Image (spheres, rainbow, N blue to C red):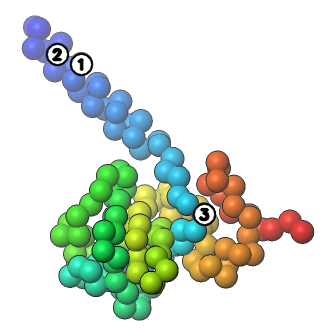
């Protein structure tokens, strides 16, 4: 009987934590851009169907916001938000969840320059002049 109660309690805690984790809004920096990344043998990637590279020390975060090693994603493609170093290599990569993909995000610095960013809401809007 005691084992059943402990088992049920553990199951409830796991279910609650999974549900809570799914609802956590990730905060992306204003300089992040949206794109499609195909991971090859690190540090080589394809960004929007063009050859690119991961920066030394690049951070890849999965849909649960935990760090992902490149071996886990090699040979796979994802819609991501990413930041770029001045050298042009990708530094931060966030693999997006389906609900995050639905939210508009700029795909280029030129597009972002025409918009206003609300960091708290994580939303972009047309610039009001």
Cα distance between the residues tagged 2 and 1: 5 Å
Q: Quarter of the image holding residue 59? A: bottom left
Q: In the rendered view, would you say 63 is above or below 129?
A: above
Q: Which mark is residue 30?
A: 3
Most extreme residue toward the top is: 1
Q: Quarter of the image holding residue 7? A: top left
The image shows residue 10 at horizontal and vertical percentages of 21, 23
Cα distance between the residues tagged 2 and 3: 45 Å
Q: In the rendered view, would you say 103 is above or below 45?
A: above
Question: How many other residues sit within 10 Å of disc 1, few (<14), some (14-19) or many (≥20)?
Answer: few
Left or right of residue 12, residue 4 in this image:
left
**Image quadrant where one finds the N terminus:** top left
Which residue: 59% across, 80% down?
108
The image shows residue 15 at horizontal and vertical percentages of 31, 32
Which residue has dot 2 on it? 6
Which secondary structure lies at badge 1?
helix
Left or right of residue 127, residue 112 in this image:
left
Which secondary structure lies at badge 2?
helix
């Amino acid at each position: 009987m005691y084992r059943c109660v402990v088992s049920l309690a553990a199951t409830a805690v796991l279910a609650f934590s999974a549900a809570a984790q799914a609802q956590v809004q990730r905060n992306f920096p204003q300089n992040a851009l949206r794109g499609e990344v195909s991971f090859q043998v690190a540090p080589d990637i394809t960004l929007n169907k063009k050859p690119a590279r991961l920066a030394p020390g690049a951070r890849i975060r999965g849909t649960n916001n935990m760090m992902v090693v490149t071996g886990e994603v090699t040979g796979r493609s994802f819609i991501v938000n990413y930041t770029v170093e001045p050298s042009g290599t990708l530094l931060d990569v966030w693999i997006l969840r389906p609900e995050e993909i639905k939210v508009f995000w700029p795909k280029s610095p030129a597009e972002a320059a025409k918009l206003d960013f609300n960091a708290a809401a994580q939303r972009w809007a047309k610039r009001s002049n």
